[in-house]
Image (tube, helix red, strand yellow):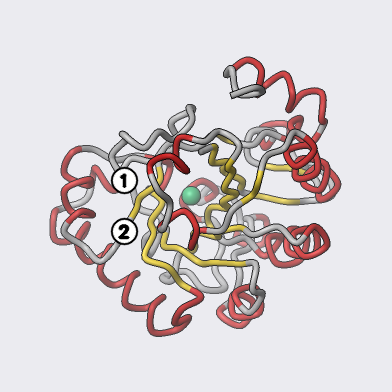
Amino acid sequence: MLIFNFHHIEKHLLHPERKHISMSPQGLSRFIRTLRLLGMRIVSMQEVLAATPDAINDHRSVLLTFDDGYTNNLLEALPVLEAEQCPATVFVLPGRYGGTNEWDQGHLPESQRDQLMSLAQMERMAASPLITLGSHGLYHRDFPTLAESDMVAELSESYQMLHQTFGENFLPVFAYPWGHYGPREVEALSQSPYQAAFTVETRPWRSTDNIYQIPRFSAFYRDGNPLVLLAKLARHNLLFA
Ligand SMILES: [Zn+2]
């Protein structure tokens, strides 16, 4: 299975340094259409959790994920996902409803930081049958640096909040902030209600991988260009898998 990780969907690339975490709405649409033209099938998180080892090893199955829960996911990504009838999972931060990106942009005035969805906006997004929510922890803290009790609280409280607020629109899946984790985090997740956890390691997911260390490819701005996406898939030997 191929899993792609997005952050921002925005009409214009605000800064060149965002080219690894941003894509235009048009680019997202072309990205989805290119994968489908290649015979790939974009699956929901429900299907991933129920997948057999053979289905996981199939490179023609693709999962799309969005990290952090920016307002542009609702305003720019959701219309594209609905137009293309394409499922996706959004990993959100229930400790920061309506907040901003303080973890990477704390040096900027609040008005210049990237805006996260409010609870009401997240409810609108989760109301789409195409969208599943997952947990990105409470506050986007760096898990390997946390005291054991703080790490466990981040996991259990984010689970409780999302489960209570979103019911079955939330599935017990987790994405490590910045993709940072170690053996302690894997062990804690395996003891938690979460059924899967996602990293940012750049390779396909194979059924033999640990379910709490699922790799994801980052989607870059230029991957919205079909030729660039084809080259990327070819580079990883994934075109004719
Ligand atoms: Zn993040």
Most foreground residue, 57 or 11: 57
**The C terminus sits in image quarter:** top right
Percent from the top left, x then y, of residue 38? Answer: 75, 33
**Whether residue 85 is situated above or below residue 225 in the rendered picture:** below
Residue 188 is left or right of residue 228, and the answer is left
- How crowded pointer 1 is (Cα within 10 Å; few <14, some 14-19, many 20+) is rated as some
Residue 105 is left or right of residue 21, and the answer is left
Most foreground residue, 186 or 82: 82
Which residue is at a point 73% across and 51% down the rendered structure image?
9
The reply to whether callout 2 and callout 1 are in contact (CB within 8 Å) is yes
Quarter of the view holding residue 179: top left
Percent from the top left, x then y, of residue 44? Answer: 56, 58
**Whether residue 114 is situated above or below residue 153 in the rendered picture:** above
- How crowded pointer 2 is (Cα within 10 Å; few <14, some 14-19, many 20+) is rated as some
Q: What is the three-letter code of the residue carrying label 2?
A: Gln
Which residue is at a point 46% across and 78% down the rendered structure image?
168
> Is the CB of the residue bearing disc 2 within 8 angstroms of ligand 1?
no
Quarter of the view holding residue 100: bottom right
Distance between mark 2 and mark 1 Cα atoms? 8 Å
> Is the CB of the residue bearing disc 1 within 8 angstroms of ligand 1?
no
For the residue labelled by badge 2, is the local secondary structure a helix, a strand or a loop?
Answer: loop
**Marker disc for residue 211:** 1
Q: Which residue is mark 2?
A: 195
Which residue is at a point 59% across and 75% down the rendered structure image?
126
Q: What is the three-letter code of the residue carrying label 1?
A: Ile
Question: How many callouts does the rendering have?
Answer: 2
Most foreground residue, 8 or 30: 30
Most foreground residue, 17 or 92: 92
Residue 170 is left or right of residue 8, and the answer is left
Percent from the top left, x then y, of residue 56? Answer: 45, 41
For the residue labelled by badge 1, is the local secondary structure a helix, a strand or a loop?
Answer: loop
